[in-house]
Amino acid sequence: MSKFFKLSYQYNSYQQYHQFSFSWWYNQGLEFKEVNILENRVQDVKELLELPGSDINGEIIYAGKGSNVPRHKLKSYIEENNLKKTSRVQTANTIIFDKKEIEEVLNYYKRASKGEFAFVNFTKEICDVIISYLKSNKSMYSNFEDEIKNKIGKIWAIEKDKYYDLPSDLKKIINCTEFKECYEMHNYRTQKILDICSVIDVYLEDKDTKSIVWDDYMLETLNSEGIELDAEYLETFHNMLKSNETSDTQLALEMLTNINLEKDGLSVALLLNEYRDKFGWGTGTQSQAYKILNKYFSSKGIHWKDDFRAFSAGLWNYYANDNKAKEIIGGFVQNNINKYLNRAGDKFVLQIDNFNLSLYKRKK
């Protein structure tokens, strides 16, 4: 529970009463960080995201908060390579991170709002003055007095511009002479992000002795000796994904995480895109295997859940130096355009027999 809280005040000139209130949600996990501390941390996280990552070059592995690699595969990898796994990031010399999780931490920091605050110890004297105003307000809801009393001993964070609006007798007791510029942060339902922040803090304190391995690279490593996706195996996946049984779809996803994605990632991405309607919210397919595959392709800018235009642009960008892959992507684009052209017309329809593709940056 946060030691800080904020209390709103306004004077109703029409009915001539003082009104105090606070939002339960707004005060959940409320905390404040000094400007230079948070801004430095934002820069640290940005630099962390820019790291290329590395191979596993330390014998003690941490893959807890902030990593989504399949635990059963990682366990086998650690055993096969005579490594050790630890639940304490302080003792690790290799940390496995999911870039998407670190991006969420960066977004969390960026949501903080800057302001000038006075931090006032909420004493019984202050409480009594506020309650006296509340009792004169006939519309006060019944349990608010108890809620105010529960704040005694905590810290009232008062914004500078709102402090001067308070009643004069209350300001006299508080007697604020100093306001501090801080970032205000709300931690309602952010426990997962806060846990990852703690891992990042440990890494930054000792980054000279700890290396970073990214989830997507680790998944490729774990699957480097995975199943190769031949024509027969691919047909099996088509049959499973065509099925109306959710269990078949779930099993297909589990099996796809065992494919050598470095070698057959293009085929897997095309397969997922073809059956993307199977994976929407409410379909019961949002499993761990789904999240692993989705994060793997997203990290490479391949958005397989989009229609063929955005999806194929991501593919073309990622496989820019692979002529065989580009030929396959070109065929995929051509087939989709021809399907679109075939929807119109009567006796004749237009079809594209041959064309060239180039990737352009969208103009703003």
Image (cartoon, rainbow, N blue to C red):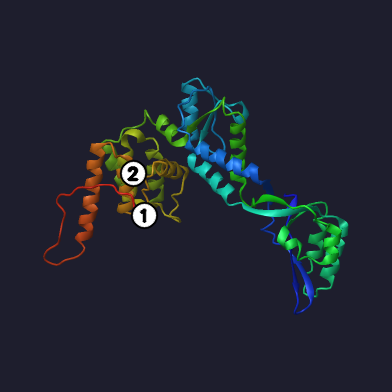
Snapshot quadrant of residue 336: bottom left
Task: Report if residue 67 is visible in the image.
Answer: no
| x and y percentages locating residue 121 in the rendered image | 81, 52
Identify the residue position indicated by label 2 in the image.
269
Identify the residue position indicated by label 1 in the image.
277
Of residues 288 and 162, the one nearer the viewer is 162
Are circles 2 and 1 on residues that touch, CB within 8 Å?
no
Residue that protrudes farthest toward the left in the picture: 347
Q: Earlier in the sequence, mark 2 or mark 1?
A: 2
Element carrying mark 2: helix
Distance of label 2 from label 1 (alpha carbons): 14 Å
| x and y percentages locating residue 219 in the rendered image | 43, 34
Residue that protrudes farthest toward the bottom in the picture: 14
Residue 35 vs 204, above or below: the answer is below
Q: Is residue 26 left or right of 219 when viewed as pictured? A: right
Q: Is residue 31 left or right of 364 when viewed as pictured? A: right
What type is the residue that disc 1 sits on? Asp
Q: Quadrant where the C terminus lies?
A: bottom left
